[in-house]
Amino acid sequence: MKLESRLWLRALYARMWVRVMSVFNEPLWIAVNIGFPFFSSVGLGLLYASTGLRSFVGFAILGGIMISFWGNVLWSMASQFYWDKQVGLFEVYLTSPAPMTAILVGMSLGGVVNTVPSAVLVAVAGWLFFAPPLSPSWLAVGLTFALTLASLYAMGMMLSSLYLAYGREAESINEALHEPVSLLSGVYFPSIGNFSPFPFSVQVFASLIPLTIGMDALRRALFFSQGLSSIYLHLIALSVMGGALLLLASKTMKLLEQKGRREGTISVRLR
Amino acid sequence: MSSVKTVLASVRIGWYRDFGWTNPLTGFLMKTIAPIASVLSASIVYWLGSSAAGTFDPSHVSYILVGAALYTHVAAYSWVPSQAISEGKWSYVFPQVFISPKSSTPFLVGRSLASFVTSALTSLISLAFAYYVAASIFKSSIPFIMTPLSMSLLLGALVANVPATLGLGILLAAYTIFASKFEWALPTYVAGLLMVFCEALFPVSVLPWPLSAFGNVLPFTQFIRAAREAVVYGSLSAYSYYVAYCLLGGLLFLAVSLWAYRWAERQGRKKGIIDRKVV
């Protein structure tokens, strides 16, 4: 038991270390990651400002910060095993004694660490450029942020298992998913609650995405000084989603791994 | 004549690359979802901000719908030459193209034209779809001129913008000959710069000088203005001015880009980097 948990932690650390070093040994990665979130924050921030309502500009900057993590989940979590399969790394994972869940969690933690610099740069640049009004409840912001990332990366782990079943279409699926999920999750505007432009049925559907709940709670905590007592339902929902997605990720990974072994498709290059 | 054949063959390769992994309808739908979401996001941001500020103007929704749909259109096909080179280096297609009797330029032009047709269709569909969705969720009548003439003018503007976008694409391709990593990140920068500097969502006058002056002279800005004149404001004289500016500016830009690409290609040959693998 002790040996197993030690192996699990070592595999986690190893996968996280590789991911973190890949970015911090190549600072250009930060420049690569910051492009989309920075320009979309500035563009939509200026759009908010041009309507005459500067107080909502913060929504665009917060959106830019969180879109960095969503992009990382999609491109570096969900489709990671697809790239790994292409270069022959995935079969190394499977034949090694390293537990797959440890590799997934290590990949997630590494992804979070790697995305933090570009998210911080978007936050600093946005704050310097627009100086949006804040009214934060920092404890609630911190807790919501942590739980949102946890459930978002748990979703990434589940998607990474599902992507094993896909080939070249993984890229197209990512391109097709990025914007609609941003729209439904209300990355740049409230997509659930009183200010939502969407009908109730769409809001219910959007609430199934952890990013939707997280963004709503973050906006309340950061701009409307709502504390833990106001957003505790969001936090419970995020915790439940995170746990459920982790469980699903583990199940789907096992299922698809077995399918891949049976059909002999694990080491098949797709291009 | 044989160059035309090369371009047509490259158009076919481009479509095969984009849709070969699935059936054309699914592939096309997958390519349409993202622009629809992007156009709706921008219009909802405007609706939310302006409703709260009490400045909501339905004609400004049309302004944003057209701008958001068209900047994504330019972004979608301007990076195709760069993508063709980086993918081609990785899959050894590009060195094959390079040693074939034809220059790589017709190959890149063909790939861009294939993507132009696809993204023109997806942008127009996303514009129409977003228009109806926006009218329904904002519960407002959004002005939009939809006549055979206005649609023809819009198509004319799309075609007039091809040289400028091709110029941008070829310029990025010239850079990609030298790049061996991270060139795949260029599209995010191209899309972001177009969003901010090409009057996609707000007038360039909002930007501080000299950024506003820079945005004002870009052919892409004139293209989006021409498209708005065609389907929102309806001034034929303003449309003609913007289209002519976009076309002439685009041709000039294309000439400079082709020169830069030829230079990059020669340097690539000399330095032996044409088949350097992308990592």
Image (cartoon, coloured by chain):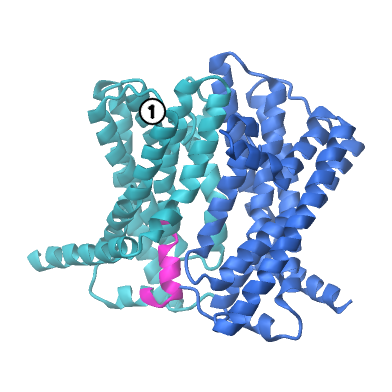
Q: Quadrant of residue B269?
A: bottom right
- In the picture provided, is B110 more to the left or to the right than B203? right
| Residue sitting nearer the eye, A111 or B229 | B229
The residue located at (58%, 22%) in the rendering is A51
Residue plotted at (60% across, 78% down): B267
Q: Is residue B187 magenta?
A: no
Identify the residue shown where x is 58% and y is 20%: B50
Q: Quadrant of residue B138?
A: top right
Chain holding disc 1: A
For the N terminus of chain A, give its image quadrant.
Answer: bottom left
* Figure chain in blue: B
Q: Position of residue B142 (x, y in %)?
A: 73, 24
**Left or right of A225, for residue A271:** right
| Left or right: A195 as drawn, with respect to B225 | left
Query: Is B222 drawn above or below residue B135 in the view shown?
Result: below
Q: Which residues are magenta?
A: A77-89
Please state which of residues A262 and B169 is positioned toward the viewer in this rendering.
B169
Residue sitting at x 44%, y 37%? A63
Q: Which residue is mark 1?
A: A219
